[in-house]
Amino acid sequence: MTSNSLKCCINPSILSADFVNLQAELARISNADAVHVDVMDNHFVPNLTLGLPVVERIQQVSPIPLDAHLMIADVDRWAPQYADAGLASVTFHVEASNAPIKLARELRARGAKAGMALRPATAVEPYLDMLPELDMLLIMTVEPGFGGQSFLDVTLPKIRRARAAIEGSGVNVAIQVDGGITEETITRAAEAGANIFVAGSAVYGMPSPEEAIESLRAKGQLAFG
Ligand code: DX5
Ligand code: ZN
């Protein structure tokens, strides 16, 4: 797959939404490709959001697919249950998994796309051989835990190397970036090789989330050339 055949996907993060009105907040992003659901347990990251019972309800009412980002410890135990809930895509952090290949296979066997996330300082090279086991690689562009942080440009070479490895091996793996994605940074991330963009504050912080999604998507797509 060459970069100009990539489709630019925008997955807004409901971390920046109003947690007491989640169903209404989903309706405000109906033109998004998926909704990014940040699950945090106050162990893997120093913040606590929501867990399986709430995600199951979101799955039942959401008009668009769910893309779960599990920032939790003991993820080998919990992630398969998110796949069982019918989510389109489940992403675990490799730093939290004892058996990432086994886990990716379990997620796929349960009908979800398998995503694997790397913190900003986690190298991608040790994991290149397992790309065929994955549908998506999530390269964090901020330290996970909070919305509204600044994009870390230091992650751009890793995105480039991951894209080169994916194109070189001919596997069909998406590269998602998450953290600090704005109308300005999306161009750099897209040029480096990302094709799925998570945006929290740059979508929900705008007067019209739907217009923000269209504008981000156009900018990302333009950068693919
Ligand atoms: C951070 C979360 C992100 C966060 C992004 O740990 O994984 O999904 O919501 O928020 P922004 O786009 O505001 O950086
Ligand atoms: Zn996230």
Image (tube, rainbow, N blue to C red):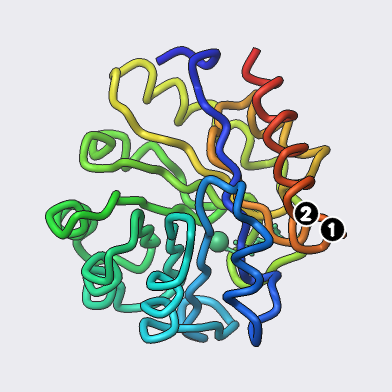
Measuring from the top left, give residue 115's x and y in whole percent. Answer: 35, 51
Q: Please name whichever residue, 149 or 215, is drawn nearer the observer in this view of the structure.
A: 215
Write the residue at 33% across / 62% down.
87
Write the residue at 68% across / 35% down.
217
Mark 2 lies on a secondary structure that is helix
Residue to which mark 1 is pinned: 206
Where is 108 relative to 9, above or below? below
Write the residue at 29% across / 65% down.
97
Q: Please name whichever residue, 215 or 200, is drawn nearer the observer in this view of the structure.
A: 215
Mark 1 lies on a secondary structure that is loop
* Residue 202 marker: 2
Query: Mark 1 packing: few (<14 Cα in 10 Å), some, or many (20+)?
Result: few
Where is 40 relative to 99, above or below? below
Q: Is residue 6 left or right of residue 124?
A: right
Measuring from the top left, give residue 14's x and y in whole percent. Answer: 61, 68
Ligand 1 within 8 angstroms of badge 2 C-beta: yes
Q: Are marks 2 and 1 in contact (CB under 8 Å)?
A: yes
Measuring from the top left, give residue 51's x and y in whole percent. Answer: 42, 83
Q: Nearer the viewer, mark 2 or mark 1?
A: 1
Q: Please name whichever residue, 60 or 142, is drawn nearer the observer in this view of the structure.
A: 60
In the rendered structure, which amino acid carries the disc numbered 1?
Answer: Met
Quarter containing the N terminus: top left
Quarter containing the C terminus: top right
In the rendered structure, which amino acid carries the disc numbered 2?
Answer: Ala
Measuring from the top left, give residue 26's x and y in whole percent. Answer: 60, 66
